[in-house]
Amino acid sequence: MEKIKVNSSPPFSFNEENLLEAKRILAMYPEDRSKSALLRLLHIAQKQNNGFCSVGVMDYIADFLKIKPIEVYEVATFYTMYHLKPLGKHVFEFCQTATCATVGVEKIIDYTCNKLGIGIGETTHDGLFSIKTVECLGACGYAPMMQLGEDYVEHLTESKIDELIQNLRNQENG
Amino acid sequence: MSDTLKVTIDGQSIQVPMGTSILEAARMIGGKLVPPAMCYYKPLKGSGGKCRTCLVAVTQGSEKDPRPMPKLVPSCSTSVMDGMVVESAISERVTEARQSVTEFLLINHPLDCPVCDQAGECKLQDLSFEHGKSFTNYKEERRDNEPDDLGDKIKLNVNRCILCYRCVYAAEQLCGTRDHGVLYRGDHAEISTMIEKSLDSDFIGNVIDVCPVGALTDKTFRFRSRIWFTEQWNAHRSCDKCCGKVVLHKIDGQIARVSARKNEWDEVEEWICDTCRFDKKENEDWTIESKRVPKSKSVQTLNKYSDNSQSVYVKVEGLGSERPKELE
Amino acid sequence: MARKLLLKNDHIAGINTLDVYQQHQGYEALKKALTMKSEDIVSEVQKSGLRGRGGAGFPTGMKWSFIAKPEGVPRYLVCNADESEPGTFKDRYLMEYHPHILIEGMIISCFALGANTGYIFIRGEYMFVLRKLEIALEEARKAGLLGKNILGSGFDCDIFVSPGAGAYICGEETALLEALEGKRGNPRMKPPFPAVKGLYQCPTVVNNVETLAAVVPILEMGGEEYAKIGIGKSTGTKLMSASGNINKPGVYEVEMGLTMQEFIYSDEYLGGIKNGKQLKACIPGGSSMPILPAYLVTKTINHEDRLLTYESINDGGFASGSMLGSGGFMIFDEDQCIVRNTWNLSRFYHHESCGQCSPCREGTGWLEKILYRIENGQAQMDDIDTLFKVQKGIDGNTICPLGEAAAWPVAAALRHFRDEFVWHVENPDLAQKQNYGLAKYAEMRPKPEPQPTN
């Protein structure tokens, strides 16, 4: 893997609201076990940082929890929900496993890629949309489906994709 | 209740203290029945269990509960029970499993032994010679990453890495701080610092000694010599950071490499500091003790390629009489 | 109408709120439990015959009895809500729509185990479920059902939700504990087992969501009464997650012992195969369990009815049976390609391998690559043998069960559908254009000759 230059990432810190939330979360674990909060704090920090888990974010969390930066890097690179590269504002994360594949998610992915003019793993020029494929999201009964932000969009059809993209674009312009 | 437990491995019985692992018990007996170990490293707490080369069959759990264990177990992290019966080298199931594991370790390995500094003292070479197969059905592409540096003294070649985690434990337990670790997951997992950074500690050089393969090598010795052409001497110096007891690897009388002393299982006896390892390369830095015959069984053991007439031929117990099995 | 225990109030609007839940006997089981001795609760659960609903089917009461009780060391209850076995989505349903039954079950279980803290470890993708759980927990806290001196019993207990961040492996209980400690989800070596050294090296019980929820009806009706539902060692009800080519996918609560025939084809349950197609194959217990060809789905090899019980699904062992696992029930119709499906699952396991032990780290990737070549017409006949050898090299040789989970689907696909693999290799071009179809996979085969018994 390509190494990251240390000084290329702007520093990060929690906003006031997230700082309060972080303190609430820390209180869930025994005092000497604050590292337990790591996964959740990374989620919160990544969200604040527009969905990008930068080195700045990771170093801040290490400092916040008083652990070594490498302990955060090890965790952030292990779990797939942390995005180590910047993505679009809205990330379509299509489930491609088992039932979703059985009921035709591949066609929906192709359709979405064509519609947005990007491939899997790419972001539109306006920085609005990214397409990713992910493994089973635990919604097989409602397949095909995808994750969008913190929500699930289920029973996907081509017209549902059209509608969704239109709505998100309108939101942006309105 | 007696203080010691009886365990039988490949028909040979021994009494061992409570808490002894099957692997350690096997080492006490010695010989062919000793399981290979690629990740377990006695001096490093928490090591073991990962590589799965030391799998053995437990055909009787204990005197009290004689049921066999259904699966093969890692001998390095399974404690002996009183009356336990274990099959290691004599079990076909174990032999097959070790062959599989060896093949798994090799499919993404670059097999660049001709240009690898570890060749001759590489545990993966030994493993594949003793427990591997002479062919593979692997047709897919191999992992291919660029070699990297961990600081100016240590070369990191992640393609050769078998993810034994020894270097991670070593940094954690010897250096007080840790700047490198295992990043990513699955077959993308790799040793890295993530951010360009040299590993800065007085003891980080020990990761070279604990690495079973050529993933972490000494840059000050890089491409200087095949290891079996060096002469090895026990030597010491007075050092305020470590024991100062080392092995000097000499070429034409000049010190080419300094490493820690290892026992017959290739485990470091006493850790040495980076000053001794990297910075003391003059003969006058050291007090020579004696010519060294490596205790572990390897090509260097006999040092027979050396043209030095001083070279002492020592017959090592077990070697010679015990030839590796025929390749298929 | 079959009996429901966990989803009996499924039709009631607002059952996710504390008020409505309490109007329907919610937290009555807890009140009863708090008047009992903790060992009596454990004994009720033992009598109920409840088995872990996460996949392994280990008797819950027995698991509880193993917990170590050293003086002065806290104990923990951890709820495994990582639910990431492909085909499984029942826990999400329970947590999203019935959060209080889980919370009530957890408080009772904590009381029985002498644990004052419980954690719900939920997969990171279920963040919207986590928020709903936190709302329900806050309701319970405000009502004095959590916190200090619960309902005046002198028992203190609190429960928190902790998310993962995208890793199937965290469904394995020791990997889950690592993640809960803020580390990489690398499974631990066992022993020590979590019952002795679990979370923070303290005695810990890890149970699945459905298992902990089932403690509530067990307390309500008594263990013996619960054990009367079902057949033999498969007691009570089971949540089944049904998906694939069926008319009515979704979560169903079934009484153990329901026939597969009724489950798949009756309108009360899955409503048959979609678009009038024929059944080709079924994975009855989540993606890691062996796939069954149609002729072995509703009947066993001996032409007996196959039932939804641990034992009946396992009838015939791996040669002609499968496992109930987590109840992730996936149906494939005649148009599905088994090679493609197997490749899909292998890609999943390759992606999810933690990389700690060599057979799984290297073997899962190898499996995926071979299957990809077979599916895409780039394979030779010896690749099929290699595939079998590789899965055999993984099976049983890994630290955690993910190795088996990756190996079994491949082994089962080769066992029952080998001719489809061979067809792919022999007809690489054709295999790109059309599917192998149903072939003879739905045809009943003669009963095997009974083995002479000496």
Image (spheres, coloured by chain):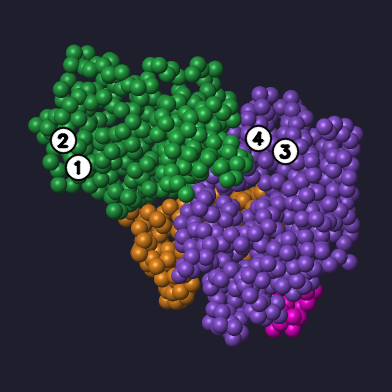
Q: Amino acid at mark 2?
A: His
Whether residue C327 sits left or right of residue C193 in the image: it is right
C358 or C225: which is nearer to us? C225
State yes or no: residue B300 in magenta: no
- Label 4, label 3: how many angstroms apart (C-alpha)? 14 Å
- Label 1, label 4: how many angstroms apart (C-alpha)? 54 Å
Q: Are marks 1 and 2 in contact (CB under 8 Å)?
A: yes
Which chain: green?
A: B
Q: Amino acid at mark 3?
A: Ala
Q: Determine the chain carrying the residue at label 1.
A: B
Q: Nearer the viewer, mark 4 or mark 3?
A: 3
Q: Nearer the viewer, mark 2 or mark 3?
A: 2
Question: Secondary structure under badge 2?
Answer: strand
Q: Are marks 1 and 2 on the same chain?
A: yes
Residue C85 place in picture, x, y as percent? 65, 52
Q: Residue furthest front?
A: B1
Q: Nearer the viewer, mark 1 or mark 3?
A: 1
**In this picture, is C202 found above or below B131?**
below
Asked if residue C352 can be seen in this view, the reply is yes
Q: Amino acid at mark 4?
A: Leu
Q: Determine the chain carrying the residue at label 3.
A: C
Whether residue B163 sits left or right of residue C32 in the image: it is left
Provide the major secondary structure of the magenta segment: loop
- Label 1, label 2: how many angstroms apart (C-alpha)? 8 Å
Q: Which residue is mark 2?
A: B236
Q: Which residue is mark 3?
A: C412
Which chain: orange?
A: A
Which chain: purple?
A: C
- Label 4, label 2: how many angstroms apart (C-alpha)? 57 Å
The magenta span reads C9-27
